[in-house]
Image (spheres, helix red, strand yellow):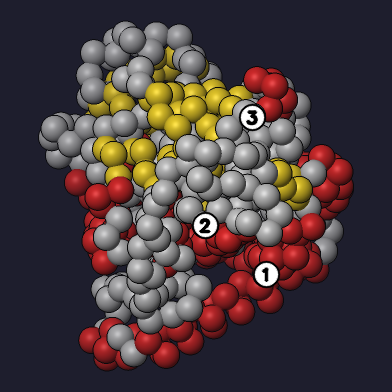
Amino acid sequence: MLTHGRGSPDTRAPRVAIIGAGFGGIAAAAKLITSGIGSFTIFEKADEVGGVWRDNTYPGAEVDTPSHWYSYSFRYFDWPRTHGRQAELIRYIEDVVDDFGIRPHIRFGTAVRSLVWDDARHGYDVHLEDGTVEEFDVVISAVGLFNVPRYPDWPGMDSFEGPMFHTARWEHGHDLSNANVAIVGTGSTGAQLATALAPNVKHLTIFQRDPGWVTPKGERELSDLERTQLRNPWRYRFERYRSFAREQIRFWGGKQMQPDTKENATAQAQGEAYITDTFRDRPDLRAAVTPNHPFFGKRPVRATGFYETLLRDNVTFLPKAVERVTAGGLVDVSGHEHKFDAIILATGFRAAGYLGEIDLRGRGGVSIHDRWNGEPDAFLGITVPGFPNFYMLFGPNTNMGTIVYNLETQANYAVRDIRRMRRTGVTAIETRESFHAAYNTWLQRALAKTVWKTTPSYYKTPSGKLVVPFPTAMVVYWAMTRAGRRIASFSRRVRRSDLRTASPQEPQRLADCAA
């Protein structure tokens, strides 16, 4: 009989449920396997891995970050270009899944609907969409930030007689080559899509509600010599750390995100110069694309070629919002109707709606959505008091820098706690309310000094609270996760005699680079 008492730890590996098989869920799985913990299941509602990159198959889909930086520290990939495209990113994540033997742990086509904490046994009842319930000791949510498309609420949405779909739900069966197409939205997705689609349709009309700052990305194919050099693990690691250092120097102290600073003014001047250079002969377009908010007030769009796309003969740029949909097209806010064969919605995601599709209930049956009341927060964006053994990847206020690095940092946080549970016999780990409150007080004070506070964006809740970004460099966040994990939490043990035993798997060696 296994017991939990001081000095007699239970060394079984906790049973872990991971929700989502995107970059975050696969990072957590790889970290668990490397720690010798094979007692986990990944619940993925889709039929394949990839998360946001599986869902977004629109023309031109690719990352904004250099490929060797938008990847795991522990897995090299022979990237063909500076910025990974959607198909290459899917191939990369599939390679990681196969290399680490993760696929047998994934249950595809299985959505999690609710999680209910059982304080008697220190675990969660995981309720699945098919009505079944399974028991786990720990839950890691890796559902992501950009997984629920934002559909507009325009009148007449069901009246359009042609195809109308969201970029994250691309309908590949339509031939748009001889079509008059509308794109609504000029964020990162809209800019990428417009650049790729314009040469391949009869006419493209782009609706812009509010301009954002745009900078060229500088993407290109890598030469054979560069690819050969990057196959050397040390060179690959060097390029990763060089990118990391550049980004940390750039964002150290958050000066670029603060109004009336030299750093922010310099960034804005560069954005203005790019607009002036591109639209020197088109003052109408120059005025239409110039934002009225400070640089970084909204997420800047990194898109080479988007501004040049607006100058094409077969492109019409309308700096107007849409008012309603008709059977034949769209009516803008000035009352003018535009006829289209197809309408594509590049209208973003419900980014601030964390865990929006999951009913999570912690100690005492408290719902996390009731606790949040529309204003999500968490300690380091990972844990919430009252919800033991529950970890979020890409949770509130963790959108900064390169997300794959952040996902690894958060996965490390969760896996260290799980290793502690296996090593010491602890059965419940929970963040202290005092640390949670202190952290979020500091966080909101720091965010109040930024340009994000002055600008409407998806970073905010309806009340204006910033719940998406982190206010300073990634290295600061990393240090907080390392220093704060143990001191900010308390642990408990429950005495159980019917624990399932599990033999830890042999650790798999991480390839190429250390995490």
- Residue 424 figure quarter: bottom right
Residue with the mark numbered 3 = 119
Q: Secondary structure at mark 3?
A: loop
Quadrant in the picture for residue 474: bottom right
Vertical order, 330 against 449 (above or below): above
| Disc 1 secondary structure class | helix
Q: Position of residue 431 (x, y in %)?
A: 74, 45
Q: Earlier in the sequence, mark 2 or mark 1?
A: 2
Q: Nearest the camera: 273 or 58?
A: 58
- Can you give x and y, in whole percent of width and height, for residue 377 in the image? 71, 38
Residue 20 is left or right of residue 138, and the answer is left
Secondary-structure class at tag 2: loop
Residue highlighted by disc 1: 475
Looking at the picture, tell me which residue is in the foreground, 318 or 1. 1
3 and 1 marks in contact (CB < 8 Å):
no
Identified by mark 1, the residue type is: Val
Q: Residue 11 bears which disc, if any?
A: 2
Q: CA distance from mark 2 to mark 1?
A: 33 Å
